[in-house]
């Protein structure tokens, strides 16, 4: 079997696993079996991962023992089991003003799309069947370099899929400017009002997809005004405030957004995703939604295992203790099935609590604390 | 006696105290060797190395003259010290004494020993205090993280002259295009000397080496550096790493093992990137990232603001260009990064400001 056909078969198995898990069916294979099969595929095709396996002495028989690739590796090297000419998408991390962005190459976006939609539907969608979907984000272009924009576009297609304007004829256009309501000038408040009005005329709710910072900009633009959304509307909020001038705690942001849009506060749902992952986690706050959990608790899908690990030993910490996040993401068939981040989390029974980024060591003296280990651009 | 002469006498009295601390036969020197390993986390050998190599005990007259000229006269001088590089207390207090006859010093809570030893060696020269209370017109020197500097800058009363010395790192730029194997080994040994001092926790400690040369010579240098660090670790064992430091080392080890080449270097790691990737800052604790670059200035440019020290070796014309590019950093040859002349603050990047 070639690496390509092996990858293709693994994608099929992952999608089958996800469908079965969501349907509550008895899985044809376990999470660990599938994780180990993906790891073995990557060890054969990714030299860097093979070195990690060899150095760790892991035998790749247990999902918990798969060596995790640090997310920094995505900024230092290509993390892919396939050659660049087979890339279907290359998603870039946001980086910072001084650091190099990371890159997650995908050979196919089919699995990403299917898994995102499946878990997104659980977290964000409830009857009726249709809704108006818009994003407080800039239009991504035909080949988005942002995995978040790709996912937002997929949500627009799957959860709405109709022309936005009532008068518009023809087919759904995911790049219609009326759906992407942010630009360097700020948030298009009039555009959002228009979208909410369209939803109201259709007697449908709206689904507003946004980064946390975009919602702050919306609140700033609205001031003391409110912009009531139709009943049953939902706001998905994601991302932090890296490099931004203003920051609001997630719970407070949810409260203020709910007030501004006349929503139940529980309808503002947090999402946690990373460019280096294929899968996402959500808060289970939406009444009538498919996930259940309190504010601040992020629920992973069955095809994603998140473990708080000790940053020094990389071994799991006791339940309730703080560790850095280790992900085993079955969706990462062609990149790194196990990754470790510098995000601190706490594992709880039904999800994880996000606690922010682990601080680098030397905040205690004159040796510089390098929060971003990888800096600058590649040399010419 | 004029004020300049009195300032010189104050500085020379402090240097004499430092000389006693460096002397293993002096009671103060014995006390230093007893308390400093626990206070700093360095091994006993690491403390000894630092006392012998980096504590300024024999500054030249010209250096002292330059140090005196590097600071303005002040009615009162206040010093807030950081931990990590224990000998830095000496220069920090000397600068304050050069500026004022009234000096108050607040040591780091983690490492208060060195400044107390200096105070014992030079009684009545300055006061060690728990809190600093600067008034308008006073000068305030602070050493620590950038966050600490920002917080202090906000909290000082108006009219205080603030000398902020925040975080920094060291780097090395080597032109190895026409260098013999013997010279490569010498340079690796010199860089290792700079790395080992203070277990790399200082702002003068090199954490990145940029090599201009072939892939082979870059790998050869990295291997020689790893060997030199391993050999040094036998003679000067690394001290204890904090949990966060150890975690940073694991992060660096695994990222580089995935993305580049990784060499064991005693208790630390040397990462090697021969493909001109982005600059990576190795964590403290005797880890060094060696990267090949076509243009060292371009490769190091992301570190420009952070770079407190830069060691350079290579073709003179090439070295001149690099020196000009990073004029804000302390420039030295490899092996001399941790021994800058006693001629002023080691960190020359940030001018003083009036709050």
Image (spheres, coloured by chain):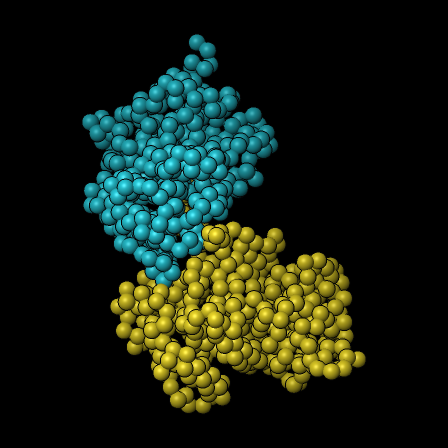
Chain colours: A yellow, B cyan
Name the residue at the top extreme.
B1
Residue occupying the point 52% across, 67% down: A91
Q: Quadrant of residue A50?
A: bottom left
- Image position of B69 with respect to B108: above or below: above
How many discs appear?
0
Residue A95: x percent and y percent?
Answer: 52, 57
Q: Quadrant of the N terminus of chain A?
A: bottom left
For residue A77, say whether it is visible. Answer: yes
Residue A291: x percent and y percent?
Answer: 53, 79
Q: Quadrant of residue B186?
A: top left
Residue occupying the point 39% across, 19% down: B62
For residue B189, say whether it is visible. Answer: no
Residue B110: x percent and y percent?
Answer: 37, 42
Query: Would you say B258 lies left or right of A139 here?
Result: left
Residue occupying the point 53% across, 42% down: B151
Residue A201: x percent and y percent?
Answer: 78, 80
The front one of A129 and A142 is A142
Residue occupying the point 28% across, 41% down: B180
Query: Would you say B53 lies left or right of A281 here?
Result: left
Query: Would you say B160 lies left or right of B37 here?
Result: right
Name the residue at the front extreme.
B178
């Amino acid at each position: 079997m070639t690496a390509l056909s092996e990858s293709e078969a693994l994608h099929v198995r992952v999608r089958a696993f996800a469908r079965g898990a969501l349907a509550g069916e008895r899985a044809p294979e376990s999470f660990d079996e599938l994780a180990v099969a993906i790891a073995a595929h990557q060890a054969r095709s990714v030299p860097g991962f093979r070195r990690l396996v060899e150095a760790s002495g892991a035998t790749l028989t247990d999902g918990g023992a798969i060596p995790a690739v640090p997310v920094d590796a995505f900024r230092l090297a290509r993390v892919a089991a396939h050659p660049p000419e087979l890339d279907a998408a290359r998603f870039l991390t946001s980086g910072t003003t001084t650091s190099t962005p990371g890159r997650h190459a995908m050979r196919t976006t089919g699995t990403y799309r299917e898994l995102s939609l499946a878990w997104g539907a659980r977290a964000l969608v409830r009857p009726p069947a249709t809704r108006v979907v818009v994003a407080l984000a800039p239009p991504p272009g035909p080949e988005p370099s942002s995995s978040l924009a790709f996912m937002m576009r997929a949500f627009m297609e799957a959860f709405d899929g109709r022309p936005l304007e009532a008068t518009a004829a023809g087919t759904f256009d995911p790049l219609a400017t009326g759906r992407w309501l942010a630009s360097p000038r700020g948030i298009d408040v009039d555009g959002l009002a228009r979208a909410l009005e369209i939803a109201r005329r259709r007697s449908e709710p709206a689904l507003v997809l946004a980064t946390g910072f975009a919602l702050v900009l919306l609140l700033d633009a609205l001031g003391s005004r409110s912009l009531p959304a139709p009943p049953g509307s939902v706001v998905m909020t994601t991302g932090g405030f890296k490099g931004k001038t203003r920051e609001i705690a997630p719970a407070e942001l949810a409260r203020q957004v709910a007030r501004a849009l006349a929503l139940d506060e529980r309808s503002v749902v947090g999402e946690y995703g990373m460019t280096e992952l294929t899968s996402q986690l959500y808060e289970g706050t939406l009444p009538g939604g498919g996930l259940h959990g309190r504010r601040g608790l992020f629920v992973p899908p069955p095809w994603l295992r998140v473990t708080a690990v000790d940053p020094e030993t990389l071994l799991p910490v006791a339940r309730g203790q703080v560790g850095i996040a280790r992900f085993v993401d079955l969706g990462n068939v062609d990149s790194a099935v196990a990754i470790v981040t510098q995000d601190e989390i706490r594992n709880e029974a039904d999800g994880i609590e996000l606690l922010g980024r682990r601080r680098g060591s030397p905040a205690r003296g004159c040796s510089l604390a390098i929060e971003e280990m990888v800096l600058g651009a590649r040399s010419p | 006696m004029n004020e300049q002469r009195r300032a010189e006498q104050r500085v020379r009295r402090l240097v004499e105290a430092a000389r006693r601390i460096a002397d293993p036969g002096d009671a103060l020197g014995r006390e230093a060797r007893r308390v400093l390993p626990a206070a700093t986390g360095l091994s006993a050998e690491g403390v000894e190395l630092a006392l012998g190599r980096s504590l300024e005990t024999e500054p030249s007259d010209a250096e002292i003259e330059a140090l005196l000229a590097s600071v303005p006269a002040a009615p009162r001088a206040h010093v807030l010290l950081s931990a990590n590089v224990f000998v830095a207390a000496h220069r920090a207090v000397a600068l304050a004494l050069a500026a004022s006859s009234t000096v108050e010093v607040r040591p780091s809570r983690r490492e208060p020993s060195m400044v107390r030893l200096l105070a014992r060696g030079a009684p009545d020269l300055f006061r060690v205090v728990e809190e600093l209370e600067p008034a308008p017109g006073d000068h305030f020197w602070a050493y620590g993280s950038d966050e600490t500097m920002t917080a202090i800058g906000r909290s000082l009363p108006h009219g205080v002259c603030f000398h902020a010395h925040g975080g920094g790192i060291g780097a090395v730029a080597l032109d190895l295009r026409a260098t013999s194997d013997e010279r490569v080994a010498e340079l690796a040994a010199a860089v290792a000397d700079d790395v080992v001092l203070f277990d790399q926790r200082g702002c003068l400690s090199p954490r990145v080496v940029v090599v201009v040369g072939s892939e082979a010579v870059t790998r050869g240098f990295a291997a020689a550096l790893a060997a030199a660090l391993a050999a040094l670790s036998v003679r000067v064992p690394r001290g204890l790493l904090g949990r966060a430091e150890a975690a940073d080392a694991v992060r660096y080890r695994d990222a580089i093992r995935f993305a580049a080449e990784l060499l064991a270097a005693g208790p630390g790691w040397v990462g090697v990137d021969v493909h001109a990737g982005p600059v990576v800052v190795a964590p403290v604790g005797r880890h060094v990232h060696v990267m090949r670059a076509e243009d060292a200035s371009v490769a190091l440019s992301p570190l420009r603001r952070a770079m407190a020290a830069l060691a350079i070796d290579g073709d003179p014309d090439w070295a001149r260009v690099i020196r000009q590019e990073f004029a804000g950093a302390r420039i030295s040859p490899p092996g001399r990064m941790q021994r800058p002349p006693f001629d002023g603050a080691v960190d020359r990047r940030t001018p003083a400001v009036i709050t």
